[in-house]
Amino acid sequence: MSRRYKGGRISATPPTTTGGAGGVAVGVWTLKDQVQAIGASAWPTAPLYVDYLVVAGGGGGGATRAGGGGAGGYRTASSFTVYPGSAITVTVGGGGTGWSYGSSAPSGGNGNNSVFSTITSIGGGLGGGRSPSQGGQVGGSGGGGQGDGGVAAIGGAGTSGQGNQGGSSSGNFGCGGGGAGAAGADGGSTSTTAGGVGLQSSISGSATYYAGGGGGGNYNTGSGGAGGNGGGGAGGNTTSQAGTAGTANTGGGGGGGADNASGGNGGSGVVIIRYSDTLPAASTTGSPSVSVSGGYRIYRFTGSGSITF
């Protein structure tokens, strides 16, 4: 016997299915759709809205009076839609390895990507090295360039909306890698240049800079380029001094090595998520730190895992 549904119709438009949250039905439901969905325990839950910060790993610094590594890509937004009950993968990208002194081909690498749901931040670019002269690599922010004997080397490009260009060198000194807030400084004909500054976020409950570019490495005597505010490592100062590593969980680029020295490693990234503390706590894997501040519940991932709201 057929079942009747009294009381008229909310709409003749059937629900549609989205790709989000594993295929959640949304839209306007008929009364028949509602009764059948409720009976099958398939009535959709209301979405939640969260804020996120996703910072990728910084790029490694170049070797031998070299360019600093580019900062990891920086992406942040508020009111991102998630659905209760669906696990969302979180990936925290590691920093790239600094270029080893004595290797003619790039032996280091770009930083690794960080991911939250559909949001991907691109790892920072490897800094350029002297042997042979080579510009910085493309990344979330680009690695800095390093020229040799007056031969120019171009800094790597950044990814739109995530970071900036690495500095381009016209001489024997390394230039800074790009940061999320500014490009690495050009120059390199008479001295090193600094890494680009990162960007500040208060999503964790305190104002913190992330994604600073690594400083360029020095040629002979003097100072290496300063790392950009946001975890960028400083360039090496004197002969055989390696670049400083980017700070962990900031996405800072590694500093370029001084003459006859290796580049510093890039700093690892971080993923931070927050939402109203009036809502139930999420379940997680990967052991993020959890705190409550300013009316928000905050999850800070320094390693990969998942979160279910």
Image (spheres, grey):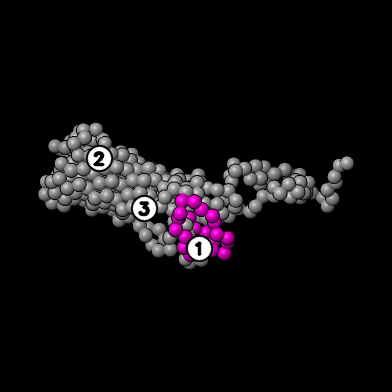
Q: Amino acid at mark 2?
A: Trp
Mark pair 1, 2: CA separation = 41 Å
Q: Which residue is at 50% across, 61% downward? A: 297
Q: Are marks 3 and 1 in contact (CB under 8 Å)?
A: no
Q: Residue 81 appears at what percent x and percent y?
A: 56, 51
- Residue corresponding to mark 1: 296
Q: Which residue is at 36% across, 46% downward? A: 94
Q: Residue 247 appears at what percent x and percent y?
A: 31, 53
Mark pair 2, 3: CA separation = 20 Å
First-in-chain label (1 vs 2): 2
Task: Please indicate, yes or no, whether residue 34 appears anywhere in the rendered image.
Answer: no
Q: Residue 3 appears at what percent x and percent y?
A: 85, 45
Residues shaded magenta: 272-292
First-in-chain label (3 vs 1): 3
Q: Amino acid at mark 3?
A: Asn
Q: Nearer the viewer, residue 44 or 15?
A: 44
Task: Please indicate, yes or no, whether residue 23 appears anywhere in the rendered image.
Answer: yes
- Residue corresponding to mark 3: 249
**SS class, disc 1:** strand
**SS class, disc 2:** loop
**SS class, disc 3:** loop
- Residue corresponding to mark 2: 99
First-in-chain label (2 vs 3): 2
Magenta highlight on residue 39: no
Mark pair 3, 1: CA separation = 21 Å
Q: Residue 6 appears at what percent x and percent y?
A: 84, 50
Q: Nearer the viewer, residue 13 or 74?
A: 74
Q: Nearer the viewer, residue 216 or 292?
A: 292
As displayed, is residue 201 above or below residue 117? below
Q: Amino acid at mark 1?
A: Tyr
Q: How many marks?
A: 3
